[in-house]
Image (tube, coloured by chain):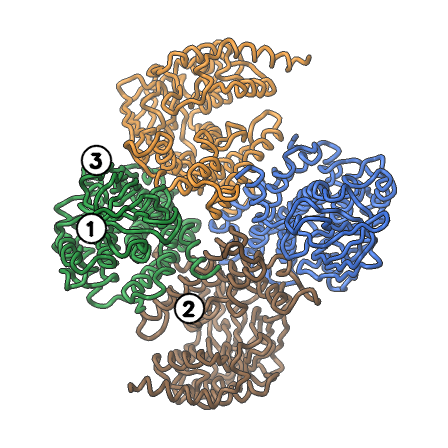
Chain colours: A blue, B green, C brown, D orange
Amino acid sequence: MPLVLNEEQNMLKDAAKDFCTNSTPISQLRGLRDGASESGFDTDTWQQMVDLGWAGITIPEDFGGLGFGYLGMGVVMEECGRTLTASPLLSTAVLGAGAIIHGGSDELKGDLLPQVAGGELLLALAVEETPHHNPYGATTTAEKSGDGYKVTGSKKFVLDGHVANKIVVVARTSGNAGDRDGLTLVLVDSGAGVNVTRTIMADSRNAANIEFSGAQGVLLGEEGKGADVLDKVLDAGRILLSAEMLGGVQECFERTIEYLKVREQFGVPIGSFQGLKHRAAQMFCEVELSKSVVLEALSCLDDDSEQVGELASLAKARLNDTYNLVSSEGVQMHGGIGMTDEYEIGFFMKRSRVCEHSLGNSAFHRDRYGVIQGY
Amino acid sequence: MPLVLNEEQNMLKDAAKDFCTNSTPISQLRGLRDGASESGFDTDTWQQMVDLGWAGITIPEDFGGLGFGYLGMGVVMEECGRTLTASPLLSTAVLGAGAIIHGGSDELKGDLLPQVAGGELLLALAVEETPHHNPYGATTTAEKSGDGYKVTGSKKFVLDGHVANKIVVVARTSGNAGDRDGLTLVLVDSGAGVNVTRTIMADSRNAANIEFSGAQGVLLGEEGKGADVLDKVLDAGRILLSAEMLGGVQECFERTIEYLKVREQFGVPIGSFQGLKHRAAQMFCEVELSKSVVLEALSCLDDDSEQVGELASLAKARLNDTYNLVSSEGVQMHGGIGMTDEYEIGFFMKRSRVCEHSLGNSAFHRDRYGVIQGY
Amino acid sequence: MTVLEEFRLETRGWLEQNCPASMRVSVPEDQIVGGGKRQVYANPDAKIWLDNMASKGWTAPMWPSKYGGGGLSKEEFLVLQDEMMRISARAPISGMGFSMIGPTLLDYGTQEQKMEHLPKIVSGEIRWCQGYSEPGAGSDLASLQTKCEDKGDHYSVNGQKVWTSGAQYADWIYTLVRTEPQAPKHEGISFVLIDMAQPGVTVKPILLISGNSPFCETFFDDATVRKDSLVGQLNRGWTVGKRLLQHERSSISGLSSGGKKGRYDDMGKLSDIAVEYIGKDSGKLADPALRDAVIQNELNQRAFGLTQQRFMAESDKGETATFATSMFKYYGSETGKERLELQLKAMGTQSLGWEGPAFDVKERTLTRTWLRSKAGSIAGGSSEIQLNIIAKRVLGLPD
Amino acid sequence: MTVLEEFRLETRGWLEQNCPASMRVSVPEDQIVGGGKRQVYANPDAKIWLDNMASKGWTAPMWPSKYGGGGLSKEEFLVLQDEMMRISARAPISGMGFSMIGPTLLDYGTQEQKMEHLPKIVSGEIRWCQGYSEPGAGSDLASLQTKCEDKGDHYSVNGQKVWTSGAQYADWIYTLVRTEPQAPKHEGISFVLIDMAQPGVTVKPILLISGNSPFCETFFDDATVRKDSLVGQLNRGWTVGKRLLQHERSSISGLSSGGKKGRYDDMGKLSDIAVEYIGKDSGKLADPALRDAVIQNELNQRAFGLTQQRFMAESDKGETATFATSMFKYYGSETGKERLELQLKAMGTQSLGWEGPAFDVKERTLTRTWLRSKAGSIAGGSSEIQLNIIAKRVLGLPD
């Protein structure tokens, strides 16, 4: 756990900052929203991200990736979070690719991972069936069928499910909803037996509800032991999403501080009012603590440490709460114009809440942390 | 639920304010503490309170009391709370007398209640067996023996248990710890088979741990149905303790506001700093809301309303939290001198926490409120 | 039978006959009647109900009957409220005419102004909006720049207002303007009434983060104001304007309900919604940390409601003390915001839908109500301003 | 084997031989060694352990060896820490000599001052205390009034200091005094070292709400100060004093542990204590609302510890940036206070005992630690002051 970036990671971060600032400012997201874009992200932009190697940052070099690790992916996600960049990076390069890396046969990896790194393949992970994160809650079934499995059931809030070419489905081959045992991961093509409805969310980003009616797919990992792969994939997802959120937190906070300096009321900058100063300073502390937990969690991922689970929960719970706080205070401190759609600060508040409910809210992660700690 | 006091109650309040200000200022409590008083309260003062009729405020006129009701007792408790008056009012006139009023035979009432009103008899209610309020948790047993019952077991944190002449013991005649059924209230004399150890608490007030080894007593209410009486007595106790706490809250808050006006730092009164102003204004709101819930809860008691239970929990939970907040902020805003024993503000902080853990902390009462509301 | 009991029986009978059945269910947000010349009645019963109530003056029950009001005493008003609640009758009309400018004219208006404007509010003929804030002014209301010049037989107004709520539907606007540019900030301001049906007034809706446009920018370009449309004295409009703000704060805090109902409880009780979306475990809401927070919020709402009732009971005239409005505005909007944040947590991803079939009406409404609630602690004097007022006016803390 | 690995082996061996067995358990509060001429050793091993460590200079491992210190590099220091932790060796000595005046003399002292004072700190011969605050000054430290006059061959000091922590045990006091009464507040202050063993210095302990007297009032009545006991320039003591405050803030925040251990964790982990007093239900702490709060506090402590480690890692010299000390002081003391409040909730009425047999040592210690913790956000610059510093220095918000 170095808790500082190395030079390579710093260079990646600088490059990501440049790209996001210039190519994916928030106005891009606004444009996608107002133009009712069907994919919800800009495909040219995605191709550029692929060309920069981002889709393969965590994919081993043997399979066509950069092998830069999670700290590398983290700095990119963080910069994307600053500009609310819409892209399939989390769904495809973290969640989907992760399931294949941890659960796929060498043949499957050799076949699919280069396609992910090359931007030809979009993936999604279908886990939720209720409005709350519940990794072991699957009632969707998988039945053996030929070489593979047939999947039946319905999934909610599948990130980028509406554009994915292949979907990793968390299904059940035995046991009951809530059991960790009996889960099986099946990789299905988005085609026959897969009915996708995009859900238009408040943050103008992308998810889908998906009905599977006997869709055919292949096994990832072992039958009934899907949770072993799933936990790893979800923890990586939680930590990388936390990294994205950290970017949003910082950008939103910095914009708010800047506004406090320039906005005048009663003849003075509102940042001179101690009531606001103290709240700003308190937020500063929360932001600094957030940076530390994300960095440590990313390091643990790279080290494949036993502490990944607790660090994922530490990071996600903290980033949920900090993003919620900083974005709410951002709107409040901007006053009336913070309430207008024209001004961008509100976009962070919308994104913060969708992130909060993706891959586990704070109650979920605090409970999980307590369980890991044995109380 | 009138939510305003009538003239009689206002007069009682004024008289109580006079008495407490003049006869029981905080310096009295300090004196009791430093003199290591054995009873923990001043017996002359208690006699004066009795002479004012306070011991019999809620006792019906037929039994020698004033029959002024709970709103009347509430205003007295509130004024006692302002000066942290140490007296057996809650233990004897509310909890003990309440158990006799709701559970005693007419003969017992006729015998004992006039003695309570006359200040000759001190009572206590022995309910807790752990450090947490748990009204149905009794494992202390009561066994039929002659006309009465023999009680065996140990009780903790019995308010004024070290001075009580008679003790209402919550014992079990059937069932298991936690069961509402099977509880039986037994009134025992503090004598043979009763071993009392006074507990010196941080607030310099009075409680005791008591061992009962076959102590003989008489039944209050029905065998096995003690919880019906107990609930009423505890709710009255919670609400009246909330009234005392409301007095402490107001006094502590007002002293703090006064200090903010006179204490200068950086050449100006510290009350001119917006950071402190906003916190003071937020506390003001909590104090105002606290007044309302106590008033409403007292009214419900007088009306014997079905809502007594939920109002007791509303009041106790809110006063716990508000007293905690206002006394902590009181110390913080007083700065260094707030930390000294010489200054009185710290007495409120100590009292607040002991009150908080008497008759149910906030977690207990929020949980109870939720249960009453059905979720 | 007391007079009040008699009044109750009469009222009950009258309501039974005059309140259409379709008006006895709670009103969908898009069918709330605000009156005015542009009002469209999706349900014709709404117009009948309004006319019936207006004929008794019961759209403004406590206003004097000579101005078209109901002329009821406070006690009678409470009976009317009770009886309406009994049959779940919806409010026939609401808006700033009733909550803001009406009460202000009753306090400060001339006899002629009252006679001209109040009956048209009561009947629903004229709808009002408010022109206070200006771009760049925000909480510092008194720094307003909109100019009002004396042109002999009339005034002429030039400038821009912002956050003019419902201006796109309103017929008249009451507004604060600067009549004496050289005077200190709080002096030289006047309170004038402006007919919006003139070329000098232009209205442009503002799109909010909630996707709605309840507010507008309103531009005055040589807008004409009659000389007799000045309320209170020339250059002393700040006094009138401040009084009106108290009415606004009461209304934003949900004070008008007298604490009988929690804010946002139209969407259902928070705890019921939480149970619906999360379920129970051994009889308790299955997420214990959220449960504690939900109970806390419901306890706070209840304490808040009791406090509103207490202040009403303490006041003879049924009015609320100045400082209390700041407390209610502050606490009501903050508790309301918290309630919606908890509702988001309870409903999870279903609480964040924007449009489309994956979310039902209740869910989509919540998303937007949540976003809109953030204005509660900004508009009408921010939470920070209310805390300043409490610290200064109530607690007497020094500047 | 690398040099560092070699150092580790040597250190391990040396500790094995030189750390008495009774020094390998955590230290009861009343046996913490502070050194100085009044030090009494309840356990003679404590004196042996101190002398052994002092002989290596390891009571101040990173101070230069010419001043008696250990002369270790940061890496070696971390190894020493590790190895001490491995055998649970307690710190041989602690106090303001090590955490405050020592580092300050290293930064600002003359060669002679370093040679005179540092070795006596290292050996434990001399104990120091701090004279900063004055009655009435509080957070406005620079308004201090204690007068220091030039008497030709010496200075003479008159005035009163308050909150002089441990003054009743100290031999020397470092203090801020006013040497130029006419100058603006922050100028005209000097930093001087005063020998307390003289008639002009009187110490009076202050009884606190916790029942302890860790602080004193210290009176100077024509106290004599040697001319060469001025640290830094005359009238420029504010600079020295501010730098020292950062050391103080680090220490109050628990920063010195480098985030490896939560504050107050000497009394046991909060969650363990909660389980002990409340029990479990289905494997989880039985009070679910408290459980959530306990987890939250432990998460915050962990994030705080990681942040301390991050700042140490980011800094080359192993020192903490100025602004970071304010953050750590603020967050550390607030999180620490919250931890103790939660411990009260967990332990219920057993957490509020004052004395007598009904409460065990751990319980009675908690009551007083809880009360004492309230000073964490007051002493050494209140939480409000730290927030001001962050707002101004880090965020650049205007005055």
| Amino acid tagged 3 | Asp
Of labels 3 and 1, earlier in sequence is 3
Which residue in the protein does label 2 denote? C259
Estimate how packed mark 2 is, as few (under 14), some (14 to 19) or many (20 or more) residues with alpha carbons within 10 Å.
many
Circles 1 and 2, Cβ within 8 Å, touching? The answer is: no
The disc at residue D392 is none
Label 1 – label 2 distance at C-alpha: 53 Å
Q: Residues within 10 Å of mark 1 (few under 14, many from 20)?
A: few
Q: Nearer the viewer, mark 1 or mark 2?
A: 1
Let me know if residue C107 appears in the view.
Answer: yes
Q: Quadrant of the C terminus of chain C?
A: bottom left
Q: Position of residue D255 (x, y in %)?
A: 51, 30
Placement of B253 over or under C336, stated as above or below: above
**In whole angstroms, how far apart are the C-alphas of marks 3 and 1?**
45 Å
Disc 3 to disc 2, C-alpha distance: 48 Å
Helix, strand or loop at mark 1: loop
- Eyeballing the image, is A53 above or below D111? below
Above or below residue C136? Residue D144 is above
The image quarter in which residue D312 lies: top right
Give the image location of residue C242, x and y in percent.
43, 69
Residues at circles 3 and 2 in contact by the CB criterion of under 8 Å: no
Q: Amino acid at mark 1?
A: Asp
Quadrant containing the N terminus of chain C is bottom left
Q: Say the numbered circle drawn on residue B34.
A: 3
Characterize the local packing of mark 3: few (<14), some (14-19) or many (20 or more) Cα atoms within 10 angstroms.
Answer: few
